[in-house]
Image: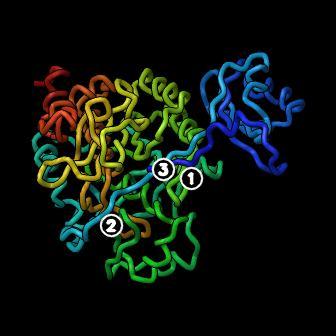
Amino acid sequence: MKRRVLLLVLLCALAVPAEAAIRLIVRVQGGAPVLQAACLLLGCDVQYPLGDDEGQLVLVTVPLNLTANLLLNVPGVLRVEVDTVGQTSGATQSGAPAALYDATPVSYFGTTVREGYVKQPAAQIIGLAATQNRFGVRGAGIVAVIDTGVDSSHPALAGSLVPGYDFTRNRAGADEKGDVGQSTTAVIDQSTTAVVDQSTTAVIDQYSAAALNQPQYQAFGHGTMVSGVVHLVAPGAMIMPLKAFHADGTGYASDVIRAVYFAVHHRARILNMSFSFQSSPMELQLALTYAKLNGVISVAAAGNEGRETMVYPAGYSGTVMGVASTSNSDTLSTFSNYGQRLVWVGAPGEGIVTLYPYGTYAATWGTSFSAPFAAGAAALLLDVQAMCGEPQAADSLSHARYINPDLGYGRLDLYQAVQAWRRAAGLQ
């Protein structure tokens, strides 16, 4: 996962075009009014507050030749950090799985979906049907999916969405179909299969594949696919789509931070974050700590570099559960990041059949699609007993199928997780 290099240049007084600017996240006592007065003198621009309870967090744009020290010297300014860019991504795929071709319509908790979606290997591996049948759990609570948005008109999600927000455009709603033009959307066709990009095999025609296989669309559908996995595991939970990423897969830390505070303020109980930053945005960590203190369960993808490393927010141990990818034979996926400091559990992440924009289906690879299995599992726990926060969810999900230390507590096992929470809640 890559991010743009926006660091260091802040500290240099360079001869740059007048329109060049950099985005800064500023924490200031007194909030935007304090900065607005200072920016009249310094030449910076106050954009908007970022949603924290104290009203201290503000996004500011400054010319590249303005040093950070000038802002830090403003009375009341507590901290300044560059608004870094995170990335959603999938992993290299190796051909469409057989389940993608099983288009037999079946009823699934009030909607009609494809049989290949419900009965795919990943669902069987984690024990989805057995857990639903044995314990009668369907999922509960609101799962906020911070991503590229969602296909809000997908038939499989009918009745399962609550209002979201588009932080990339600063407007209500989070439908990602607005990211592509009519010339592309008009040719979506469920009759054939083609590779869209390195991470996705979607049920579209060849013309659409060519149109979407461009850098500006490399993550189109990502949020819908993630939401589809959440819905598969927890069809009784509601999904809150929060669009903080563009169709090219990039998103600013400031928009993610706003999404976290929005989710907490609008009663989300679970955060799914299928993206990563290579360095740790301090204010994102503080926002997620705030979420935890308010009873929110946070889950994040471990990343797809295939190495032992740290990425964020998955690396915020004790606040966020990092999720690695496993194969259908219960081994670490070759593309998945790993390590005891990063990974809480693993979950299937290869050839996952899920929803795709325009009412279609896709198969996809990557830790981005392992994380929502864990988020859905957390929603099942809420269905057992609503007084389940991050510590209780983490403990319950740690009852997994152990594989090796690189995969934390092991591969997600829904039956064991729900059983553990029932026991802890005094229900058995």
Mark nearer the viewer, 2 or 1: 2
The amino acid pointed to by label 2 is Ala
What separation in Å lies between label 2 and label 1 (alpha carbons)? 23 Å
Q: Is residue 114 visible?
A: yes
- Up/down of 148 relative to 214, above or below: above
Q: How many marks?
A: 3
Quadrant the C terminus occupies: top left
Q: Residue, x 63% and y 31% (percent of image)?
A: 81
Q: Are marks 2 and 1 in contact (CB under 8 Å)?
A: no
Task: Give the residue pinned by disc 3.
Answer: 2
The amino acid pointed to by label 3 is Lys
Q: Residue, x 74% and y 17% (percent of image)?
A: 76
Q: Nearer the viewer, residue 324 or 287?
A: 324
Counting from the top left corner in percent of width and height, residue 11 is at 71, 33
Q: Nearer the viewer, residue 306 or 104?
A: 306
The amino acid pointed to by label 1 is Gly
**SS of the residue under disc 2:** strand
Mark nearer the viewer, 1 or 3: 3
Q: Residue, x 28% and y 57% (percent of image)?
A: 110
- Up/down of 79 relative to 101, above or below: above
